[in-house]
Image (cartoon, grey):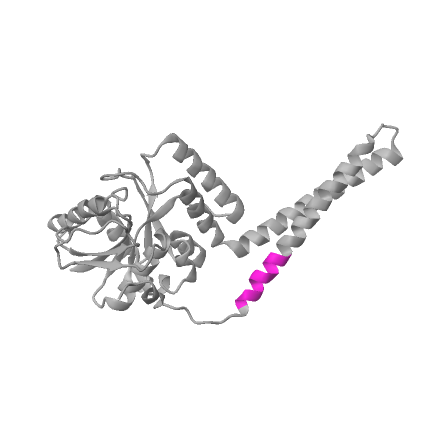
Amino acid sequence: MQKVYCVTPLYNDWTSCAVLVDKIMQLEKKHNEFMFYMVIVNDGSVILLEEDIFWSENIKILNLKVNVGHQRAIAVGLQYVHNEVNDCDVVVVLDSDGEDRPEDIPLLLEKSLKTQTIVFAERNKREESLMFKTGYWFYKLIFNTLTGKKISFGNFSAMPVNQLKKVVALSNIWNHYSGAVMHSRLPYNKVLLNRGKRYSGQSKMNFTSLVLHGLSSISVYFDSISVRILKFCFYGIALCFTGVFYILFQKFFTEKAIPGWASSLIMIIMGIILQLFSVTLIVLLLQLSSRKNTDAPNTKKYLDFLED
């Protein structure tokens, strides 16, 4: 029997989480090859937990000292399982509100155990508003433009324990879990799944939180983004020089009238691009210089966040 530990971050949403836990525990009746355990990371909730909501001995609640955010709460849960659990076979990461459907967990587990890779749930059908879908489309476009990668999945995933020990050593999981896995070049696969609806209440993610979440995923690729910006700057400078040469050619070798402001405008644009190039180059060099730090990965950082 495979022992599955489900890591879920939670902030004040105890009611939805109780429904989620009940549905996950019911999966054992249909899939007796799995035994499920819950690791609920209480991310500094201000609403107190009712003592009788979670009664099973298969449930562990990790209370954090302060609210650290969705991604860091996931990192705490993963490092806890890695360090404190000795009989884990597979880890599942999912949200506590029901949007990551428990009935899809067996599909992720099956492919993860078969391929021995991290398997993410790629979103097929979403229930969000048109505004959210539009914002998500722009986010994917910006992510693809800056990083050269396509992202179509979130945190809902399953991984065998042999991949967990590699994931918890990634420093970027404290910034963005799925982005860190993509950037690390660890093998991963995707399963096309629909997104569910919240069990109760409203999402805690506002516009600011969504923007910061998107920027966090992009920041994982900071070094490669700097290189791509440098490349775009080279293209822009080359284009400006081409424009200058064209104007000079038209002015000295043809009889066409050239406006006096054209060359001035091009020189101003080229000056802006050169400044952008210089700043980007400095940032890239600072980023590369930070690689001289050879500190070993800290897989027990989670202890700093846990209450006694």
Q: 235 or 173, which is in the foreground?
A: 173
Queried whether the magenta region covers residue 196, the answer comes back as no
Measured as percent of width and height from the top left, residue 91 is found at 26, 57
Q: Is residue 180 above or below residue 300?
A: above
- Does 284 appear in magenta? yes
To which quarter of the image does residue 19 belong?
top left
Image height check: is 79 above or below 105?
Answer: below
Residue 93 as seen in the image, left or right of residue 30: right
Residue at 60 percent of width and 57 percent of height = 283
The N terminus, quarter of image: bottom left
Q: Residue 304, percent across and down?
A: 34, 66
Looking at the rendered image, the quarter that the C terminus falls into is: bottom left
* Secondary structure character of the magenta stretch overall: helix
Picture residue at 12% right of the left edge, 53% below the top: 32
Instruction: State which region is magenta.
Output: 282-291
Tell me the residue at 23%/63% (across/down): 88
Location of residue 199 in the rendering, given as x and y in whole percent from the top left corner = 22, 39
